[in-house]
Amino acid sequence: MLHMKPLEGTLVDARADHGYRIYFGVMPQGGASVEEAAGTMRYLMKVTVSGEELPHSKFSRRRKVLMELPPEDSGKAAYFAIRFENAKGGKGPWGPVFHAIIP
């Protein structure tokens, strides 16, 4: 479960029609092989340091989002980065990249 909130010091217009773009990727232990990285799941080959490196994204207007990943990804690391996005596709600054082990 991801809980979204603006980073400290971020100016947020309460009248703005915005949501959150959640970028994410999954990395097997030790990194993906070339075949896994090029496959349909697009697994990560190395630890990501920027949200731009994450292959998948999901948009939500909710402040809490349940991320459901396939059962076969259990034990792998999921990386996330979140940023504001408005209805016209305008994007705010990147939040920090963080990760968790998929249960």
Image (tube, rainbow, N blue to C red):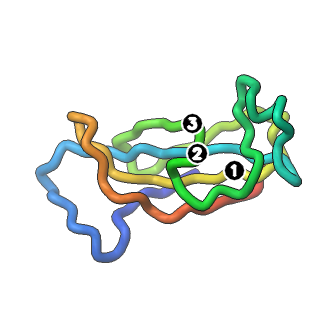
Q: Nearer the viewer, residue 41 or 33?
A: 33
Q: Tell me the number on the disc at residue 78.
A: 1
Q: Nearer the viewer, residue 94 or 17?
A: 94
Q: Residue at x 21, y 67 (%)?
A: 11
Left/right of residue 58 with respect to residue 69 in the rendered view: left
What residue type is disc 2 on? Answer: Leu
Which badge, 2 or 1, is on the more N-terminal residue?
2
Q: Residue 101: x, y in percent?
A: 76, 56
Q: How many angstroms separate mark 1 from mark 3 (CA)?
A: 11 Å
Which residue is denoted by mark 3 in the rendering?
Answer: 56
* Mark 1: secondary structure: strand
* Mark 3: secondary structure: strand
Q: Tell me the number on the disc at residue 54.
A: 2
Location of residue 89 by image quarter? top left
Tell me, yes or no, if residue 39 can be seen here.
yes
Left/right of residue 72 with respect to residue 94 in the rendered view: right
Given the current orientation, which residue lies at the most extreme left position? 15
Please say if the residues under marks 2 and 3 sit with CB atoms less than 8 Å apart.
yes
What residue type is disc 1 on? Answer: Ala
Q: Residues within 10 Å of mark 2 (few under 14, many from 20)?
A: many
Height in image: 14 above or below 11?
A: above
Please say if the residues under marks 2 and 1 sit with CB atoms less than 8 Å apart.
no
Tell me, yes or no, if residue 103 can be seen here.
no
Q: Residue 51: x, y in percent?
A: 52, 52
Q: Tell me the number on the disc at residue 19.
A: none
Q: Nearer the viewer, residue 66 or 96?
A: 96
